[in-house]
Image: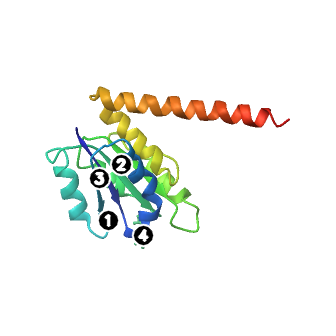
Amino acid sequence: MKKAAIIMGSKNDLPKLTGAIDTFKKFDVPFEVHVFSAHRTPEAASNFSKNARANGFGVLIAAAGKAAHLAGAIAANTTLPVIGIPVDASGLGGLDALLSTVQMPSGIPVACVGIDGSTNAALLACEIIAVGDEALAKKLADKRAADSAAVLEADKEISSMQ
Ligand code: RP5
């Protein structure tokens, strides 16, 4: 199976990424976690990205806050799918990072999830890997079914209170 990477711009972003880490563990998707900054360690970020396909990765997640250019910088150096997570790391509530991540100029795509949306980023990464992996696709479908059942159960419980 192809690996996923979670790359964060600062170790201070790590608390926002537990949802992604837990999701990869839950679905048994192999992953690595790294800290590379687009502005503090541009060469390390670029080297990782340039070599990611040869190193067995199938999808890269890049999480950053403030003027968040990490996902774009990673995407510039690979044709692997890149998912950006805008992190709330400033007094602007993450809107700064959201706009920086989502508004990539045409030609270098970055798929952007919601602010601090690390669980969805990992689920999307799993779905990308599952395009070529039936067993993983089945696990994802089972999760959807379990989520649906939980909502139907909640409806029963809440509606019976009235
Ligand atoms: C971004 O700037 C990082 O992704 C982080 O969210 C933010 C602040 O970084 P630190 O100054 O806390 O390291 O590059």
Look at the image and tell me in which quarter the N terminus lies.
top left
Q: Are marks 2 and 3 in contact (CB under 8 Å)?
A: no
Residue type indicated by callout 2: Lys
Residue under pointer 1: 37
Q: Residue at x 27, y 46 (%)?
A: 30
Residue type indicated by callout 3: Ile
Q: Secondary structure at mark 4?
A: helix
| CA–CA distance in space, label 2 to label 3 | 24 Å
Q: Earlier in the sequence, mark 2 or mark 1?
A: 2
Cβ of disc 4 within 8 Å of ligand 1? yes
Residue under pointer 3: 74
Q: Is residue 154 left or right of residue 3?
A: right
Q: Secondary structure at mark 3?
A: helix
State ligand 1's quadrant: bottom left
- Percent x, y of residue 37: 32, 65
Q: Nearer the viewer, residue 115 or 76?
A: 115
Residue type indicated by callout 4: Asn
Label 2 vs label 1, nearer the camera: 2
Cβ of disc 1 within 8 Å of ligand 1? yes
